[in-house]
Image (cartoon, helix red, strand yellow):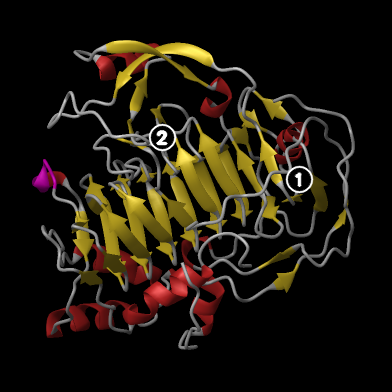
Amino acid sequence: MKEETVKIRLKLSNLIAAGMAAVAITVSVAACGGGNSSGSAVDAPGTPNQGASAPTGSTPTDPTVTASLPTGFAAGVTGGAGGEVVTVTTADQLVHELCRTMASTGCTDTAARTIKIESMIDFTSKSLTPVTGCLTPNTASPTKTCAAPKQREIMLTAQDWQLPYCDGQTKATYNYDPVGTGGIRIGSNKTLLGVGANAGIKGRGLLLKQGVTNVIIRNISITDINEGKVWGGDALTINDATGVWVDHNRFARIGRQLLVTGDGSATVKVDNLTISNNEFDGRTDYSIDCNSRHYWNILLYANGRATMVGNWLHDFDGRAPKIISQGTGAIVQVVNNLFENSGGHALDYEGDPTLVLLEGNQFLNVPSPVAGSADPAHRGKLFGFYASTTATTASCTAAFGRACKANVASPAPKTDYMAQDSAPIDAMKSEAMRLVTPYATEDVPTVVRTHAGVGKI
């Protein structure tokens, strides 16, 4: 979309959230890696083997190794600051530098390190693997066919636990790339940093789990992981991790989730997470309803605190995001995001201990900004509104020392499940210093389209 001149109305904390403040990282020299590379450019938005060859470009004074300060619940995360800086050009080098040592308990590499990518690194296989699957069930239109180039989405059954998803469906053989189903491990105290607008990973995602902490992922495109094939792989998986900043990335053409946290269990925690200034691009030829919009977008399925700020989610059909928690629960601030062009719903929240503060967001051409629930008595609590009242102003001022910002939906929602539950406000009162103070909601489309995504740090 066309960029526009932005009126500077943001407070310092919001400029930081938009990725406009920078501080240099002091670094030293690094080594190690090996493998194959791809230098293909990233398509513009809107238009595992450890090797031994040395990566290039390591320097203690490289001016491109910079980082803005994270805001929200990830404030204080430093990633690889103060450690080695390596530039990787091959798939094997990238795998090695993100986690040099592994054990049965997970990645044991905790050394501070910044890993830079300057081009697209391609993990896709030369040959595909056949597997049984079915068309993703469409209850309303089981036999629906799509007009080319649109196609029905496929549900893979490569593992036994996936088999029930095709019960009662016509099965067939489909080809997929197994590499895409396993994410690249990232160790603690790492920064993965793309340089320029064409840096990224194609055909495989990233994985943080088993107690990983203090990680930054910035300015990377993650694309083309078994597109149109459910269970074909996720772009970014965060499971049992603390202190993660996901900023200025782009996610597109992924088989399953663009971003997922947790696994739904009551004990898994993903805490101090900020998802900021990313582009979640749902455009695809594959879908359940032939509408060219991705359904499996963001699934926050863990206990813990998270901030979603300044993201651009567009051309989606649902789960944007879906927030579910059990156990100690989830506390999530969703603020100053742009949700645009949906065939269904944006926010979906479930689970008794799930608490969501929704403020200062714009929903443009989104039929249902907030989804309904099949189990309203156990769907968690939401505080958000389209028009402020004396009561909403009083609640936010008492808890945060400021009024909360209204959300905007245009056109008016076909279905409206916005709520003003007090529980999120009460729970976040003690976290007030870590909440992002929103800027004016009317500025969200211009600011987000201008600053979200890759090549903008």
Q: Is 321 contained in the magenta span? A: no
**Amino acid bearing label 1:** Ala
Secondary structure of the residue carrying tag 1 is loop
Residue 15, position as x, y percentages in the image: 53, 78
Q: Pinpoint residue 315: horizontal percent, then vertical percent.
A: 35, 52
Whole-percent x, y for residue 145 in the image: 24, 28
- Residue appearing at x 20%, y 47% in the figure: 352
Q: Is residue 399 visible from the viewing direction of this image? A: yes
Q: Residue placed at 27% from the left, 38% from the top?
A: 290
Q: Is 63 placed left or right of 183 in the picture?
A: right
Give the labeled residue for mark 1.
111
Question: Residue 314 placed where, x, y %?
Answer: 37, 56
Instruction: State whether residue 106 is above or below residue 59.
Output: above
Magenta residues? 373-377
User: What is the total number of numbered labels drawn onto the structure image?
Assistant: 2
Residue in the image at 57% along x and 50% along y: 43
Label 2: how many residues lie within 10 Å, few (<14), some (14-19) or many (20+)?
many
Q: Quadrant of the C terminus?
A: bottom right
Q: Which residue bears the numbered disc 2?
A: 256
Labels 2 and 1: the sequence-earlier one: 1
Q: Nearer the viewer, residue 452 or 20?
A: 452
Q: Residue 406 versus residue 263: which sits nearer the camera? A: 406
Above or below, comparing residue 451 to residue 402 in the picture: above
Amino acid type of disc 2?
A: Arg
As helix, strand or loop, the secondary structure at mark 2 comes to loop
Q: Is residue 438 visible?
A: no
Q: Residue 180 bears which disc, if any?
A: none
Could you give the CA–CA distance between mark 2 and mark 1, rounded to whole angstroms?
31 Å
